[in-house]
């Protein structure tokens, strides 16, 4: 497994709670932990290999080759915007790990102006924030629209 992002069901402290965990295989096949938690978390290559052996792809985990625009777009479209942004940021700030990334796949439209921006320039937000239960962020807002809208509509927090 090389140059791929893995998204898997980690977590599991008590009962059967789980949360998405992430790791990446670099171009040489070395494994790097991005985020792992709980007893299902896999901070090491040995653990993630075992996880892959014992679990089901497409249900317990997803593999996204970083050179595949189609797969990365799939990841960006189907995952929590907060996670997509964190992963993109992680890729941007890490310097030592060799990856070949189709950066154009990490684009998303701003919910206000509709323009496509790189995810690192976007802030996850939710149009459905009426207070009360927080459902989580579902969309992105670009920096410009954020400046314009945050003061008038109170859309952000
Ligand atoms: Zn915008």
Image: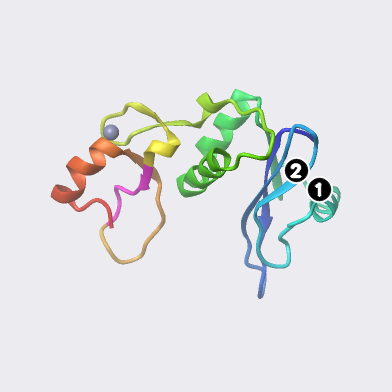
Q: Are marks 2 and 1 in contact (CB under 8 Å)?
A: yes
Tag 2, which secondary structure? Answer: loop
The foreground one among 129 and 93 is: 93
Judging by the rendered image, the residue that carries numbered circle 1 is 52
Does the image show residue 95? yes
- Quadrant for residue 139, please give it: top left
Q: Residue at x 34, y 48 (%)?
A: 125
Question: How was this image coloured?
Answer: rainbow
Q: Residue at x 66, y 28 (%)?
A: 100
Residue 12 horizontal/vertical position (percent): 67, 67
Q: Is residue 15 above or below residue 58?
A: below
- Quadrant for residue 141, please give it: top left
Tag 1, which secondary structure? Answer: helix
Does the image show residue 59? no
Task: Pick out the residue farthest to the left.
Answer: 152
Q: Is residue 130 above or below residue 111?
A: below
Judging by the rendered image, the residue that carries numbered circle 2 is 57
Task: Pick out the residue farthest to the bottom.
Answer: 14
Q: Does the magenta portion include 149?
A: no
Residue 72 horizontal/vertical position (percent): 59, 31
Q: Residue at x 72, y 33 (%)?
A: 3
Check the picture and name the quadrant holding the C terminus: bottom left
The foreground one among 97 and 21 is: 97
Which region is colored magenta?
123-129
Check the picture and name the quadrant holding the N terminus: top right
Q: Describe residue 10's horizontal placement relative to residue 92 as left or right.
A: right
Residue 78 horizontal/vertical position (percent): 53, 39
Residue 71 horizontal/vertical position (percent): 62, 29
Q: Does the magenta portion include 128?
A: yes
The foreground one among 25 and 15 is: 25
Q: Residue at x 74, y 57 (%)?
A: 42
């Amino acid at each position: 497994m090389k140059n791929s992002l893995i998204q898997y069901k980690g977590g599991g402290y008590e009962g059967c709670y789980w949360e998405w965990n992430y790791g990446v295989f670099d171009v040489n096949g070395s494994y790097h932990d991005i985020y792992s938690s709980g007893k299902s978390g896999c901070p090491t290559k040995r653990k993630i290999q075992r996880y892959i052996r014992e679990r089901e792809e497409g249900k317990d985990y997803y593999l996204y080759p970083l050179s595949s625009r189609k797969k990365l777009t799939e990841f960006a479209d189907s995952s929590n915007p907060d996670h997509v942004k964190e992963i993109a940021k992680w890729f941007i700030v890490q310097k030592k790990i060799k990856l070949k990334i189709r950066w154009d796949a990490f684009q998303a439209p701003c919910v206000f102006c509709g323009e496509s921006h790189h995810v690192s320039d976007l802030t996850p937000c939710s149009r459905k924030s009426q207070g009360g239960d927080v459902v989580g962020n579902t969309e992105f807002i670009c920096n410009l629209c954020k400046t314009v809208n945050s003061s008038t509509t109170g859309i952000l927090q």
